Amino acid sequence: MSQRVATTSAAPSTGKRTLTLAQSQSRFAWILLIPTIGVVLMVGLFPLAQTFYFSLTDARLASSREVNFVGLQNYLYLLQDQQFFRTVGNTVFFTVVTVGFEFALGLLIALVINSNFRGRGLMRTSILIPWAIPTVVSAQMWKWMYHDIYGVINDLLVNQFGIFNQNVAFLATNTTVSLFAIAAVDIWKTTPFVALLLLAGLQVIPGDVYEAADVDGANKIQQFFAITLPLLMPAILVTLIFRTLDSLRVFDVFYVMLGNRRDTQTMAIYAQQSLVNFSDLGYGSTISIAIFLIIALFVVIYVTFLKIEDA
Amino acid sequence: MTQKDTSVATYPARTAPQERAKRNNLPRYLSYAGMLAVMLVIGIPLYWMVIASLKTNAEIYTIPPSWIPLEPTLANYPAAWQAAPFGQYYLNSIFITVVGTAIKVFFAVTSAYALVFLRFPGKQYIFLILLAALMIPPEITIVPNYITIARIGWVNTYQGILVAGIATAYGTFLLRQYFSTMPREIIEAAKVDGANHLQILVLIVLPIAQPALVTMALITVVYIWNDFLWPLIVTNSAAMRTLPIGIFWLLDQEGVTNWGVVMAGTVFVIAPIVLIFIWAQKYIVEGIAAGAVKE
């Protein structure tokens, strides 16, 4: 009898306790998250909503003319805008080339730096320097190094190594050559960043997993595919998303090196040009929203194929 | 849970790669060769930039270019220092970077902890909001943010420069990904031992995540230190401006760029960052990370 009373009285009290535990955990989570969410809403999502509103109007920058609501007119125009599709092509091409090379090289560098060898501290430090130089400076610097007359790259290729027999105008002639030349600058600057992110991912992998694999007689390559790669996945995903987002939004390196050149224009430069040079707030906003949607498409692809929600 | 346990647990992490490397030397030599190639590709442009700061302007524009300065000069350094109020810019950049990094790391750690280790309704939506915030092109945010900042009277203030950091979402996302690889057993064990969230975060999660934490802090430092467009827009006096703006002035002064002076200015800007790299890199690879699960 007394035993039964004890069990029945215990049951609701534990039920109540787990409920309050869950509630307090949830409240604590919100306390931790609210500052971040607040800033993100204010400086990120609020401007996005505003831009979407402008994309439905014929608003002009710094104009007192009345703003008219034009519905989807800007979007219909966008779908017929050849120059917009050219900028999409350029930007996606640039993104595939840079992210591909940066990921492959960055992973190799991270794996090597992660192993133990003399001088790796120096290596790790010096390898990061290109990434530390402000883009405005490094892009100008490369523009000068690419110069067809007194550029140092032509000096290397023609005079020092004799690979070409005449100077190449990397940034002046052909669209593809110019795009590759700029991709090379981005790869030079950003591979260290990729290596850094992946190195951190490698360092977080527990070492005893490898010990167990060593005991089981797994060789290096088996270990890489069976252990390193799966455990590195969250870091790989972060790296790919960061790099893809930045490449799709690329602005400064193109702007410094090629200005508003039409055939090599990127999406972000076209949006900026519509907004600032043509003062077309409505259409500039439409392009910006399109960039956002294209980026979202890439993120959805990554998330679907690399399973981001596992945490 | 004591200090001793964690320090003992570090041994497998440090010795294991050494033993593995000893066994087979070929990959090691290949690594050295590859590294050498990478160093050259990275190093030649850097060498070129640094020696440009030691050349006279006339020599910079010679054809063909000279690989060793013919008349090395240090004159570009004082010239760069005097071309813009670099002393004030240094103070501003240091202040903004230190405060901004501290704030961003703090909020990224707390929000990533909530997203990975706490259960609460609506979690996946919060994560989607952060992901969406990452995808917003900067040209969308700059004008509306300037209007907001102007409305609350923060133009030309430190808080005005600092607040526009959607990089907070970067940090949260980054740390969330690294936290999520962490072995759950340790956290569960600590909970059973009666550890509260603060203890779990400070004594377990942060030490294990040290490489990721230092990496995130480094990225934030470089990002704030080099940020150019936003500080330029939101400040209007030399007293509030930062180093990248000073460099931009050097680039923009005359029709013909005086590369020697610009490169000297660039050395001013990146020297502190290089010192931070030298100091920080060992915390990325020598955390207590690897062997922590061993109990």
Image (tube, rainbow, N blue to C red):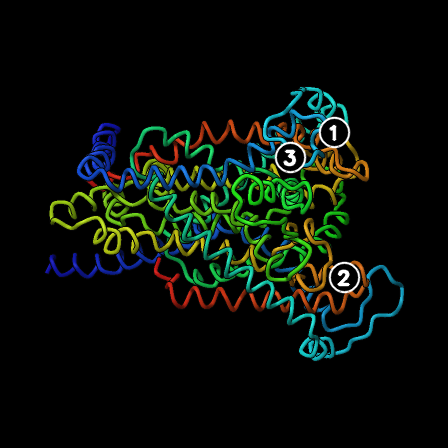
Assign a secondary structure to mark 1: helix
Q: Position of residue A165 (x, y in %)?
A: 58, 49
A251 or B45: nearer the viewer: B45
Which amino acid, mark 1?
Ala
Chain letter of mark 3 equals: B
Q: Residues within 10 Å of mark 3 (few under 14, many from 20)?
A: some
Q: Position of residue B31 (x, y in %)?
A: 32, 40
Horizontally, residue A277 falls left or right of residue B190, namely right
Q: Which residue is mark 3?
A: B65
A294 or B69: nearer the viewer: B69
| As drawn, B76 above or below A87 | above
Which amino acid, mark 3?
Pro
Res. B259 image quadrant: top right
Q: Earlier in the sequence, mark 3 or mark 1?
A: 1
| Cα distance in 3D space between marks 2 and 3 | 40 Å
Q: Residues within 10 Å of mark 1 (few under 14, many from 20)?
A: few
Q: Which residue is mark 1?
A: B58
| As drawn, B82 above or below B254 | above
Do the residues marked 1 and 2 share a common chain? no
Assign a secondary structure to mark 3: loop
Assign a secondary structure to mark 2: helix
Dot 1 and dot 2 residues touching (CB under 8 Å): no
Q: Residue at x 82, y 74 (%)?
A: A68
From where the camera sits, is residue A15 visible?
Answer: yes
- Name the mark nearer the viewer: 2 or 3: 3
Q: Residue at x 74, y 45 (%)?
A: B233
| Cα distance in 3D space between marks 3 and 1 | 11 Å
Dot 3 and dot 1 residues touching (CB under 8 Å): no
Q: Position of residue A9 (x, y in %)?
A: 22, 58
